[in-house]
Amino acid sequence: MADYLRQMPDHGSADLARRPGLASRLHIDIPLLLLLLVLTAYGLVVLYSGSGKSLDAVIRQGRYFLLAYAVMFTVAQISLARLMRWAPWFYLLGVALLVAVMVAGVGAKGAQRWLSIGGFRFQPSEIMKLVLPLTIAWYLADRSLPPRFFPILVALALVLVPTALILQQPDLGTSLLIAASGLFVLFVAGMGWGYILGAAVLAIAGSWPMWMFVLRDYQKQRILTLLDPEADKLGAGWNIIQSKTAIGSGGWEGKGWTDGTQSHLDFLPESHTDFIIAVLSEEFGLRGVLVLMTIYLLILLRGFWIGINARSSFGRMVAGSLTLTFFVYIFVNMGMVAGVLPVVGVPLPLVSAGGTSAISLMAAFGILMAVSTEKSAGQG
Amino acid sequence: MPPKQFQLKDLHREIRINNARTLTAIILVLGLLGLILSRYYSLQITDYEIYSTQSERNRVQLQPLPPRRGLIYDRNGVVLADNRPSFILSVVREQVEDLDATLAELAGLLPVAESDLENFRKKLAQRRPYEAVPLRFRLTEEERAILAVNRYRLPGVVVDAQLQRHYPHGELFSHAIGYVGRINEQEAKELDQSDYRGTFHIGKVGVEKYYEDTLHGKVGYQNVETNAHGRVLRVLESVAPTSGADLVLNLDIRLQRAAFDALGDRRGAVVAIDPRTGGVLALVSTPGFDANLFVNGISSADYSALRDSLDVPLYNRAIQGQYPPGSTIKPFMAMAGLNSGLVTPASTVRDPGWYSLPGSSHKYRDWILRIRGTGHAPRVDMHMAIVESCDVYFYDLARRLTIDGMADYLRPFGFGELTQVDTTNERRGVLPSTRWKREAMGQPWYPGETISAGIGQGYMLASPMQLAHATAILASRGVGRTPRLVQSIDGVPLEAPLLEPMVAPVEYWDAVDRGMIDVVHSQRGTAKALAQGIQYTMAGKTGTAQVIGIAQGAVYKEEHVAERHRHHGLFIAFAPAEDPTIAMGIIVENGGGSSAASPIARKVIDTWLFGEAGGG
């Protein structure tokens, strides 16, 4: 074991240094935990306003967060070796559930995404967000890295199966995010730039048949709306026009907490879920946006730090890809609300109201903590 | 370095590559976050003004505040037209998921007529987003309660209160003040758009239309904060509307009711004017109608019932009715004769009971011929001619005046011309002349036609308003005023314009007055029945207008003629004769004769002078 021991960075955590071992034994990464606490607290403050000053909504989301933290702690206790062993089985289970959705799923707004078991509804695609990177990492971990052609092909196949299943639900946004989470593993594993460039060319070349044959009308509409939101002011373009207005009218200082007119007068759609960044921007201004981005950036940097310092290939790949996936959520959500990316229905991580997303994100942070503490476990 | 084919793990290389990739990822992340940040910077800092303005425009709406329409009172202060809150059931299309289901649901809760639905769908097609489209008007309290209970399952269904014109006296004033109705497309084009924003009704007929500008008032505005659904949350600033001016009419509800009751279910019209002021004291046309029906668009069933009724209730007989004045023209003819110098009060005419033109065998009968078989007296003077309504006297006078002379001398009494009373749809009647006939009918005037014109038959036509107006000029001895329904606007008295006075010697006026007084007060007067128990002096003149021509020599049997072919009964009067304060024109369609009309004058004048019918 001693071979694997590494010196903790001096500036790693003062807390940890003062009470050596306790955090490690509990498999907690203190800096990450603190950052998450700040983020979720900030999220609740914004949510109170975004939900139309509904204390109920805040309490409900607070309960989700409590549950999500519990999930995070639980997941953090699982050793990486065990996670690695479980990954393929979870993958098979996830694919089976996605097939079940296709056969017996519950629909909403023309899309079949939910599975109802004993009155409990959930989206199997949420599970896949975690399981796919774990599975790719599991597949690549024992092989020579960077991966060569054949392993890349297998990994791509592993990515393709759930992506295709989710795409036909249809849920373009989620399928792309899941594909990305899998591909990030390959990227972190060091897949050659030649492959990456080739894939990019293929993706661009493949977008034409996608547009012609795969995308549904409403998905095309979203993209068209993004390109020219003014075309249909009261219809499809309404959301983007109103969210841009909300963001822009916030200025530097913002209109003040709960004083946002766009959100409180119902001009802003989905103000407590996907469009909550518009509420934040309107009420706290660019200052508030900078604060949020700083917290996100620190979390991302901590995630990358954990990846760099991971003890195993598996840990490195998992930490790197999960962190990048987390970044993609932030990027896509903030971009779509500001009108630079299509509206694909991605919540703002740990700020938008919603239980499933909070829990799956926290589970991911649990894995990061497992990675983080695995390496320093010997210290105690 | 091991050969590649062994696929051995090279940990150091792996870590190096991983570090490099992580660094790449961090650079990528920083770059993309910077991109996002620049987007937020451009929205929030660079274009702040644009979006701030946009947000303000979203939030704040300029809403019109419709003015309260001026009220209308009678001369005693009784409200004739006011505004009452009316509850309207409207539907906001954007908030209704399944319109048909909602409409079916509503129809199950309260009566919704086919015409309501039809209008609703028409307006639905022209609405602005989030505009509430009215479905039902005048909700009863019970209907409102039902809607309130069911409101939770009817999103998008709203009940709003709006001030709406109300006519508390229904039929009694329908023709006197007219009514308002919803602004139609034609009117919308001609109106000042900004002044009528938020106003849905406009005067359609009568005083309501004539005084539209006065009654309407001035629109106000308010800046309101609204949410995306158009619901007003807060008033930021407002400019109050100016209410329309209140009108006090010259009409007296007591006289109006006396005339209305006296007419009963007969068709007819009564107009009373105060000759001193020109004020219209009563204006009744029966049958009337409930003006409230028109306020929100009359249903087609109600409208066709009114339109197709044989009694034509929508027809304002008082100002639109065109009737031959019959013998009521005689006092005016007498004045014409005196003014022309062709007769004096003392000059007489031989009366065998008929009249014929020199060189013609056609006999123009006097009405008395079939009763007595002879004339009124061997020779008849002006007094007797008026009192007993002698036709022969006026046949002779007409011949001597000629039709054009008649026209010239009758025109100052307002015949053949609009009285310019302050209401709408007035008609001018006909004062025939050779020129008129040539222009209107393209025919020459025949001398025989002059004879019947002399007793107010033939082409001559006048409305009850014109008769009352002419009588008022007679009563005031030539000092006529334009009749006025409105007495004051917001307390400021409205002076009725003076007409060019008719100058004539006192003895002429006296002679005609005496004749008219004795019509009522002498034993030989044609309206002597009116004098029973009378406490003042009334001057009057009876008249009968033929509805169908009676063939030469035929014996007129009233009871054999269908009711609608019976003669119209007419009566004009003023009182007290010494110092007249009221002048009247009355017609009872198919009344049979003037006896149908004259008692109405007594009742109205009694009410005017004593405050109640049959006073004394």
Image: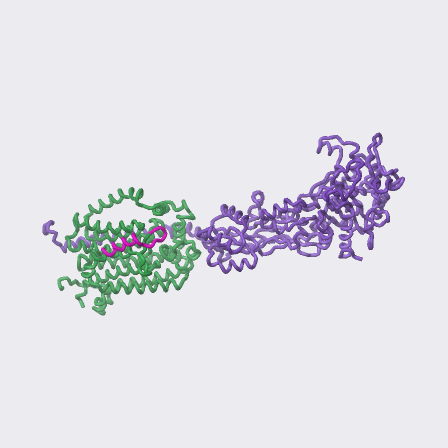
Chain colours: A green, B purple
> Residue at position x 24%, y 50% from top?
A161
Does residue B549 appear to the left or right of B67 in the view shown? right
The quadrant in which residue B322 appears is: top right
Measured as percent of width and height from the top left, residue B438 is found at 73, 31
Residue drawn where x is 15% and y is 63% of the image:
A5
Q: Where does the C terminus of chain B fall, quadrant-wise?
A: bottom right
Is residue B309 or residue A214 the one in the foreground? B309
Decide whether residue A103 is among the magenta residues. Answer: yes
Residue A101 in sight: yes
| Residue A92 x %, y % | 22, 55
- Whether residue B242 is visible, yes or no, is no
Image side of residue A278 versus residue B28, left or right:
right
Give the total of numbered labels. Answer: 0
Q: Quadrant of residue B349?
A: top right
Q: Which of these two is toward me, B407 or B241? A: B407
As drawn, the residue found furthest toward the front would be B560
Most frequent secondary structure within the magenta stretch: helix
Q: Which residues are magenta?
A: A91-111
**Residue A87 x, y percent position in the rendering:** 21, 57
Q: Nearer the viewer, residue A147 or B78?
A: B78
Q: Is residue B466 left or right of residue A218?
A: right
